[in-house]
Amino acid sequence: MTKDKGRSFGRPVHKTGPAGKARPQTAEQAAAEALAHPGLAARVAAAAIIGDVVQGGHTLDEKFAAETAPSRLSGVAERDRGLARSIATVALRRLGTIRLALSQLVEKGLPRNCGALEWILVAGAAQILFLDIPDHAAVDLAVRAARLDSKSAGFANLVNGVLRNLIRRRDEFLEQSDPLEDDTPHWLAARWRRIYGEERALAIAAAHRDEPTLDLTVKSDPEVWAEKLGGRVLPTGSVRLDTHAPIPELPGYAEGEWWVQDASAALPVRVLAVLPGERVLDLCAAPGGKTAQLASAGAKVTALDRSAERLKVLAANLARLKLEATIAVGDAAQFKAEPFDAILVDAPCSATGTARRCPDVPWIKKPGDIAALAAIQARILDHALTLLKPGGRMVYCTCSLEPEEGEAQIAALLRRNPDVSQQRIDPLALGLPEQAATAEGGLRLLPDFLPDPDPRQRGLDGFYVASLKKLG
């Protein structure tokens, strides 16, 4: 039995289903049963989406987006879609632990040609191990979900037995679980051990297990809004909440007084320190949190992104916030315009620093992605310099933990461009610990920064930030 968590938790051994396999249901019968049992449709959707992410490389956001939701969420009541997302999210956050436990409970491996059986088991295990859902409901609905799938229907009794054994051995599996060894893909764990050392790599992986809460960037008066929203002001200036309430229902949302933005993501604009009236280019701008910061500071912002659909989201956000920017669709490595006073390059990256909020990321990225993305980043940076005035400022950032997309990227840029200098960033001035500073003067933010006894109140996304100046 292998512990490689990037694969199925067990090797298929059965060539066919067991004797007496249940007769498959028709689509109409399956739909009727799903409607007859509250919460069943949500479990079926969650299992399918987990499989789509792990096997198909789709993101959670993509699978839950309005334009794609009908394919997996049709038949799921609106009130239950949050449940489906909660199940899928925690299953991906703790996928390695779940697979390891299931591998010990299904010692002979999964049957062949068993349809959605693996993902039904993963979804059921996620509820039993990590969600506040009655055990009997998790087991019963997993069994019913198996019966709805013609290929897994004959293994409903297997689902029942495995999940009941999981309940009995729950404490054992949780106690033996290791965040780096079990809940991090092996290739990423090996990278982080090499880059950060065993202790820090373990801290990063442990931070990725925590469920994050909401961070907000407010237009003004963070202390006032923290009090209104029942949150607190972080040392970095963001407002951190402790709520599960729907975002549109929170005070100030409809009035455009704030927007959701991780504490790390709010820092690059603070480093750029734009002045009112400055012409600023925001490259790879969607969905627009940094654009909103720049516009709120009084800059004349051009927000560029290659995705017209994502720019629609940016435009809607700006409209709600009553902020203005020039929006342009285009390639950041080819965009033409008069030189700008300042440029923000929030480059496309592997996003390995966002696993707290996006637990699908470690399971859909591959080792080769980092080099490919680093090459794109280099092209964007070189072109961005041609759009920057002499004496102008540029901030480069990525939500990646990988040096190729951060420190090494900027070192290579400086070697190629002797007319560019790196400006030292003071982490203390931003409310960050001294250890956030790199030797070269950039910022390396790690997910285990901002400690707190409450898991939902600690941590932030992993980021790299560099401040550059083009010599006059």
Image: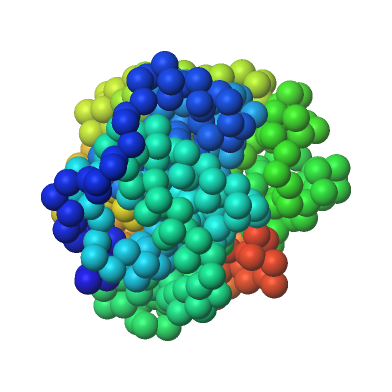
Q: Residue at x 24, y 61 (%)?
A: 109
Q: Nearer the viewer, residue 199 or 335?
A: 199
Measured from the top left, where is residue 62 in percent x and y? 39, 32
Q: Residue at x 64, y 47 (%)?
A: 214
The correct choice, above or below, for 463 with respect to 324 in the image is below
**Number of marks in the image?**
0
Residue reaching furthest left? 15
Is residue 209 visible to us here?
no
Measured from the top left, where is residue 2 in percent x and y? 22, 70
Which image quarter: residue 385?
Answer: top left
In the picture, measured across the screen, residue 219 lies left or right of residue 128, that is: right
Q: Residue at x 61, y 32 (%)?
A: 38
The correct choice, above or below, for 239 with respect to 204 in the image is above
Which image quarter: residue 405?
Answer: bottom left
Q: Nearer the viewer, residue 218 or 85?
A: 85
Measured from the top left, where is residue 333 in percent x and y? 23, 34
Which image quarter: residue 130?
Answer: bottom right
Measured from the top left, where is residue 82 in percent x and y? 59, 36
Q: Residue at x 13, y 50 (%)?
A: 15
Q: Quadrant of the N terminus?
A: bottom left
The correct choice, above or below, for 2 with respect to 317 in the image is below
In the picture, measured across the screen, residue 228 lies left or right of residue 26, that is: right
Q: Nearer the viewer, residue 92 or 128?
A: 128
Is residue 123 visible to us here?
yes
Colouring scheme applied when the structure was drawn? rainbow
